[in-house]
Image (cartoon, grey):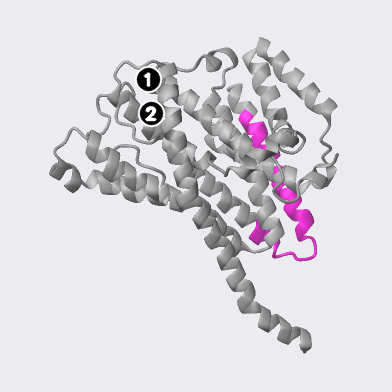
Amino acid sequence: MRLADCARGRDNNFNLIRIAAAFAVLVSHSFPLALGPKVGEPLAAIVGLSFGRIAVDVFFFTSGFLVTASLVTRQSVKQFVWARILRIYPALLVVVLLSVFGLGLFFTTQPTVAYLVDVGIYKYLLKCSTLITGINDHLPGVFANNPYKNAVNGSLWTLPYELRMYVALVSVWLVVQLNPVNKVKIFKIILVLIAAISGILLILIHFEVINMKDNYPRFFYMFFSGASFYIVRDKIILSHTLFSLFLLLLIGGLVNKHLFFVSYVLVLGYCILYCAYIPAGIVRKYNDLGDFSYGVYVYCFPVQQSVAALVPGISPLGMFAFSSIATLILAVFSWLLVEKKALHLKESWLNHRTGFLSPLRMSRSRN
């Protein structure tokens, strides 16, 4: 079955994949937040990659695939930007405000008045609610005595990178519009080249051939490989045989961290798409519940830090048990009260524009 035949509409398992990835982040955080920053999860020691890193890679790949589909389908940068703003910022603003004026006031070691007049909380509020210049992860006196000291919401660090991927994608889109004759072909070539070059850089960095941080090559590779899969979807065959072979390649890579990393980089995207579109039946029922993954992601870290502060000496397993329940409750409320309503604004805006323009279109058609 070709990917192009599957990648239509919303009948897929992306919501399920993303909620699993969000909880994988929570699992990954449970060890350092319970025991201190020097303690990592067992998986990282075995394969060299933590659950959290793999989960974030899954987020970036799926984002690249889905937002490219949105841009190509709508053919409108304005609609694309508006949709991305509504998906990220309303829930983000709520969690930032709750962190500053809820958790911050409760857990700070400073007197209330001193905390409220401290310029640090307003720097946090500004940076974390805009994401334009990165994030600020510290609030004065908050979580100062935790095993993982001072950090309020470490999950947010990836969101500025996500925004930069959107900017890069839109920039490519706008550039190719300058050549209307071959714009589709040029768009495909550029996206595939970005994915290929960043993937090569990522592997070279891993093997220390190049000495640099891998954040940008990693996120560019994951995001633009997702975008590339969508662009060449008519060429991709989702095959049980290929999926099984790629799984065997990953399992075989467990004998060596370097071999696993290379295998992981090469086959992760295909495996995600196979899991997103091929398993059907009861697993698709999860879509009826909602998309709680973003809420889990943005709430898990401050919830876990709160648990660490309230229950000193808690184990990673206890951390996961307590924080997963509280995080899921907050994520459900975030989806129902904030995110879902924000997405309705997106549809209302599109319908308003369509309704506004329809008389003009009818007039043009008559002329």
Left or right for 245, reference 19:
right
The residue indicated by pointer 1 is 34
Give coordinates of residue 280: x percent, y percent.
Answer: 75, 36
Amino acid type, residue under disc 2 in the picture: Gln
Of residues 134 and 137, which is closer to you in this image?
A: 137
- Quadrant in which residue 279 is drawn: top right
Q: Say the numbered circle drawn on residue 77.
A: none
| Count of marks, rendered view | 2
Amino acid type, residue under disc 1 in the picture: Ala
Of residues 289 and 242, which is closer to you in this image?
A: 289
Give coordinates of residue 356: x percent, y percent.
Answer: 61, 78
Left or right for 173, reference 332:
right
Residue for point 74% across, 21% down:
247
Is 194 a magenta residue?
yes
Residue for point 50% across, 56% down:
341
Q: How far is the residue under mark 2 from the one under mark 1?
A: 8 Å
Give coordinates of residue 98: x percent, y percent.
Answer: 33, 44
Please state the extent of the stretch shown in magenta in the rendering: 173-202
Q: Secondary structure at mark 2?
A: helix
The residue indicated by pointer 2 is 304
In the rendered structure, which disc, 2 or 1, sits on the residue that comes first in sequence?
1
Q: Which secondary structure is most common in the magenta stretch? A: helix
